Image (spheres, coloured by chain):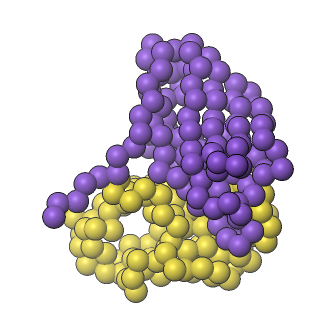
Chain colours: A purple, B yellow
Amino acid sequence: GESVGLHLPTLSVQEGDNSIINCAYSNSASDYFIWYKQESGKGPQFIIDIRSNMDKRQGQRVTVLLNKTVKHLSLQIAATQPGDSAVYFCAENSPRSQGNLIFGKGTKLSVKP
Amino acid sequence: DAGVIQSPRHEVTEMGQEVTLRCKPISGHNSLFWYRQTMMRGLELLIYFNNNVPIDDSGMPEDRFSAKMPNASFSTLKIQPSEPRDSAVYFCASSFSVASSGNTIYFGEGSWLTVV
């Protein structure tokens, strides 16, 4: 049969609004999580990270929330700007993975001016 | 500070030719990763090294792919012979250590390979 391409979830927001990007991770033993931003034609860029002993961490305009009970991670971007348009990946690391990050499929964020 | 440096940034080659992608990790980082990104499969880990030693190469697609890290500041990913299905973006990344959790992995800008 014919193969299909990877279908990325897309989030479209108005400039100035807040964005929330969600991620469900797979391994309950994972103890470190990272959000990456990938702009078109570029490599993934580190945004923010969080360890499993925390449930919230804030950066500049970004906040990461971790809910270990349901294995859920979210990235909140305040006052979204056109420059935030990109694909966002969550990644998890567990002690058994020897530092190898496991990446999610990504979410495409489109910011409307 | 210089990030992870990859070359070439773009390469177009004919099927059957050998392709060599190069990477210089961030100075002081002990771990180096090669990833491949395609629309079909997303971001996949091919192989990673710790202190120049390959730790896990289970992601390498087949024997046509090989990777080396002769020293702490240089790695190559070679495809021989190349095939059209190898067309993808190949990312090199590095981190301080894989020995413990919590080490951020930093990516290069990628090598965009097209095999015709």
Q: Quadrant of residue B19?
A: bottom left
Position of residue A24 measured from the top left corner of the image (x, y, whole percent): 57, 48
Q: Quadrant of residue A40?
A: top left
Q: Quadrant of residue B42?
A: bottom left
Q: In the image as oriented, which residue stretches furthest toward the bottom?
A: B63
Q: In the image as oriented, which residue stretches furthest toward the right?
A: A53
- Residue located 64% across and 43% down the image: A73
Counting the numbered discs, the total is 0
- Residue located 56% across and 35% down the image: A21
The one of A36 and B19 positioned closer to us in this rendering = A36
Q: In the rendered image, which quarter contains the N terminus of chain A?
A: bottom left
The one of A35 and B27 positioned closer to us in this rendering = A35
Position of residue B27 measured from the top left corner of the image (x, y, whole percent): 75, 61
Q: Determine whether B67 is above or below B26 in the image.
A: below
- Residue located 65% across and 81% down the image: B55
- Is B76 situated left or right of A71 in this image? left
